[in-house]
Structures are given as structure tokens and as C-alpha cells.
Amino acid sequence: MFIKNIEIKGKAILGPMAGVCDAAFRVICSELGAGMVYTEMVSIEGLKHKNLRTASMTYVDKNESITSLQIFGESKESFAEAAKHVSEYSDCQIIDINMGCPAPKVAIKSKSGSSLMKDVNKIGEIVKATVENSTKPVTVKMRLGWDSKTLTILEAAKIAQDNGAAAIAIHGRTREEMYRGNADWSWIKKAKDLLIIPVIGNGDIVDEKTAKDMFDQTGCDAVMISRGAQGNPWIFKQIDYFMETGKIMEKPTFEEWSRVVKRHYELVVKFKGENLANKEMRKQFVWYIGTLPKREICKFMKEEASKINGIKDIIRIIDMYNLNEQEVKYVTEKI
């Protein structure tokens, strides 16, 4: 898949997730096969007012694959300013406009994210302003619409394309649905049939088979993985392998699993410092543990993950997994 002149190698892409897709996680996913990675949402107002935390979110590491920096906001003027800023100061290769976030503080309070799906004319103005002020290709991530009565996706996607968008990612739910129920992929197929730019399918991709189903049912150019990558960054490599061979790749060994967990922690320390790394890994490690073959000890490992205070705790919790039944009983009585 090409987005303008940028080649995306690999069929699976890491989608944007607030509080998850920091530089450390993007590097991990890149190393494990993600053809492109999205940043967390970056506020265009935060960039405008030179908020330090917001500015730090535009950092892109040299070890990431193709990186799309996602921005969100309401006014076309602020999008234009943000496009100039990101073009000059960020090492990302692509700028993405968020028109899909359903969170109340984004979609309702700030009238951005998926709220924009209610006004297709405004979508055109925002895309045009961003494209005209960017030196990088501009893409858009959308939902099907605000609710079942306003399924604006086809009109919105066509307007975005006509105003210069280089690709569209579509989550097969409305804002009203949030993440409930099943994603409706039929609209992704309709968009793919309508547009000439690449279409990225998103929603309910959790493994190799659901990824193939998305490709088969929609004809999309790539699939976007978001929640399915939490604790399982191997999913990108697994999807590519399945699409190439038709075979299921063996799950990572426990040694490989342990290596990636430690690598992830070390990267967070590198980018954020040890104190923030400890807090970050308390949630990330729980997701990693959730991908292990279920054993009684896993629930105690998750409880211990809330106490992480350094690499020694990461190693200690990892070592818990290989305890025998008698040792598990002893340890759990001590906890």
C-alpha cells in the first residue's frame, strides 16, 4: 500500500489509542511487524498554546516504522497551524486527522473527533486547510457517523478525498455505539468501492482470521489493529504471516514473551524516566499477562503488576509464571 509516495510495508497497522500508543509501544509494534504506527491523539490547541506535554507527544523515534501523527480539534484555522507545526518539528511521515474518537470530552465537550461526522462540509474545509499547510501526506480516520440516523461515512470520505486526503481509515461503528456490538464492515466495503485512495479497515480485528475476513469482505488495503494489540504486539507479524502462507504462526515462546516485556519496560524508562515507566507498565504488564495460557498463577501475577517499582519487580513477576502447583500455593498464601 502506498500513501502518496510513502510505501507501507505489511498489511497490519497499529491504530491510535490514547494513553497507549506512546513512543515505547510504537517501537515495540514496529519491531514486531506493524507496517505503520499511529501516535496518540495530539491536541491542535495544545500545540497552538505550546503545551509541553502536547509537544512531547509529537516525538517520533528513529526505530519506529512509518509513523502517522494524529491530531484532533475543531477549527480549520487551528488545523492549518498544527499542520505547519508538525511539518516543521516532527519526524513523522504522515499527518492524520481524527474524526473518530467517541470519548465525551473530545466528541461532546470540544466538538471534535467523531462530532465532525455530523457536518460533511466542515470535514472538507478541515481536510483542505490541513493539506494546504502540510508538507506531509494527510489522512483521515473516521467512524460511520454520529449515530444510526446520520450514517455520513460515504459522503464524508468522498469529500475528504476530493479535498486532498491521501487515505481513509474507517472504524465500522457510529459514535453512539462507542465500542459496543459488532463493527459493520459493509460500510468499509462501500467506501472502498467508492474511493480511489487507500482504505484501511478498523473494528473487531483481534487475530489472523478476523484480519483475513476483513480483507475478504471489504477489499480494504490494510487492517488497523487497536485494542487487539494491547499485550499482543506480535499480532502484526502473525497477520502478515497468515496472509502470505495461510498458516497460523506459532505463538511466541515464554522466553520471547519475557524478552518483549522487559524491552517494553526499558523503552518506557528511556523515553519517560523510571517513575513514569513504573506507572505505565502496571497497566501494560496486565495486558501482557492476559495473553499467556491461563494458569492459576496469572491472577496473582496481575495483582503483583499493580506494585511494579522497577525492573526487579518485572523480573520477579515473570519468574512467578513457571512455579509448580506446590510453589504456587506457597506464594499465593504469602501474598
Image (cartoon, helix red, strand yellow):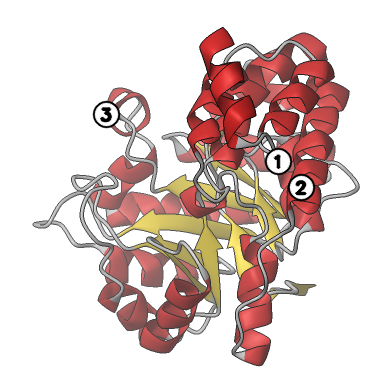
Q: Quadrant of the N terminus?
A: bottom right
As helix, strand or loop, the secondary structure at mark 3 comes to helix
Q: Which residue is mark 3?
A: 108
Label count reads 3
* Residue wearing tag 1: 25
Residue lying at the far front of the rendered structure = 326
The image's mark for residue 28 is 2
Q: Nearer the viewer, residue 180 or 126?
A: 180
In percent of width and height, residue 245 lies at 66, 90
> Does residue 131 lie above or below 52 as drawn?
below
User: Circles 1 and 3: CB distance less than 8 Å?
Assistant: no
Q: CA distance from mark 2 to mark 1?
A: 5 Å
- Counting other residues with Cα less than 10 Å from the Cα at mark 3, is it few (<14), some (14-19), or many (20 or more)? few
- Is residue 50 left or right of 303 when viewed as pictured? right
* Mark 2 crowd level (few <14, some 14–19, many ≥20, 10 Å Cα): many
Looking at the rendering, which quadrant does residue 114 occupy? top left
The three-letter code of the residue at mark 1 reads Phe
How packed mark 1 is, by other alpha carbons closer than 10 Å (few <14, some 14-19, many 20 or more), is many
Residue type, mark 3 in image: Ile
SS of the residue at dot 1?
Answer: helix
Q: Nearer the viewer, residue 11 or 232?
A: 232
